[in-house]
Image (tube, rainbow, N blue to C red):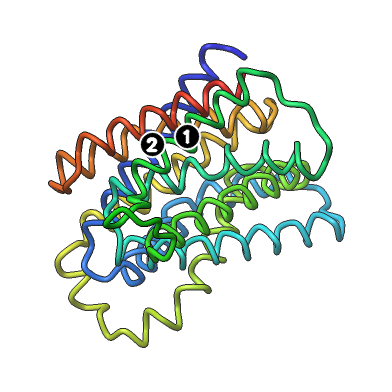
Amino acid sequence: MTLIAVLLVILSGLIHSIWNLFAKRSINKNVFLWYCQWAAIVIFLPLVLIEIRTIEYIPLAGWLLVIASMLFHGVYVLLLAKTYTIGDMSQVYPLMRGTSPLVVPVIGVLILGENLRFQGWIGIVCIVVGIYLVGDLKTKGRWNFSNRSIILAVMVGIMITSYTIVDKVTLKYLPAITLNEATNIGNLIALTYITIKSNGLRQEWRINWKTIILGGVLAPGGYILFLKVLETMPVSQLAPMREIGTVFGTLMGIFILQESQGRNRIIASILITIGIIMLAQ
């Protein structure tokens, strides 16, 4: 893996954590993310029109993969809005980004019969301990797995796993910017009903129009960087590396949003990141 590829993936993780900060600070998460999809679609449309000229033919399998990607991204953005509505960023962000690198190796070992090296098991232990610390899984000395924000964050992580794998395959049929435009349209469709029903359009735009436009650039921009590298590199190496953003997101939640339990959550995000790196080796 080249140094440029590594830097682009890390930059993608940083950008991801920044626009997630914008989403967390918004008034109505669904409305904010809905506006961001519109901004992204409009801003990147000229590049899509240029890129789409290079596409000669998309077979049925390609169209089905695009639809699957749009569905996974749509469910992801709905879950993301709900997660940030009820949970702290410094708690849910490490869970969202740490679930994928944890779930994939475990499924590989338990279901697919794959082997995991010793350092991989150490990585899993680090992630599990990190999730325990950040998830506040004990309340008054008793185990508590009913915390809605934790459940939603894990579901978001599963959606991230799903669309990352699907998008890797879809890149065989569709270039990165065009694929990202399709997923933004999927997000827009998924958010439209709940957004219009909320009656929060005017207030959100009036207060957060600057971060909406910036989010419309950063959210797809960061993912396009990742997709561009993913076109030539294996997803097993790149996806875990991008989750270095767990540290960025946790620090933003603690120091910018002034969320509580800072020490535990910083330690947890570092453990999750160490675990992800060990699994990626």
Among the 4 quarters of the image, the one containing residue 2: top right
Instruction: Examine the rendered structure and indicate whether residue 51 appears above or below residue 182.
Output: above
Q: Residue at x 41, y 36 (%)?
A: 130
Q: Is residue 32 left or right of residue 37?
A: left
Which one is in front, 13 or 231?
13
- Whole-percent x, y for residue 71 in the image: 63, 65
State the SS at label 1: loop
- Whole-percent x, y for residue 204 in the image: 22, 71
* Mark 1 vs mark 2, CA separation in Å: 6 Å
Q: Are marks 1 and 2 in contact (CB under 8 Å)?
A: yes
- Whole-percent x, y for residue 222 in the image: 44, 39
Q: Is residue 251 left or right of residue 37?
A: left
Q: Residue at x 56, y 59 (%)?
A: 73
Q: Residues within 10 Å of mark 2 (few under 14, many from 20)?
A: many
Three-letter residue code for mark 1: Glu
Three-letter residue code for mark 2: Thr
Q: Residues within 10 Å of mark 1 (few under 14, many from 20)?
A: many
- Whole-percent x, y for residue 136 in the image: 32, 50
Q: Is residue 213 left or right of residue 156?
A: left
Instruction: Examine the rendered structure and indicate whether residue 122 appears above or below residue 250.
Output: above
Among the 4 quarters of the image, the one containing residue 200: bottom left
Residue picked out by circle 1: 243
State the SS at label 2: helix
Instruction: Examine the rendered structure and indicate whether residue 70 appears above or below residue 113.
Output: below
Residue picked out by circle 2: 246
Picture quarter with the N terminus: top right
Which one is in front, 150 or 205?
150
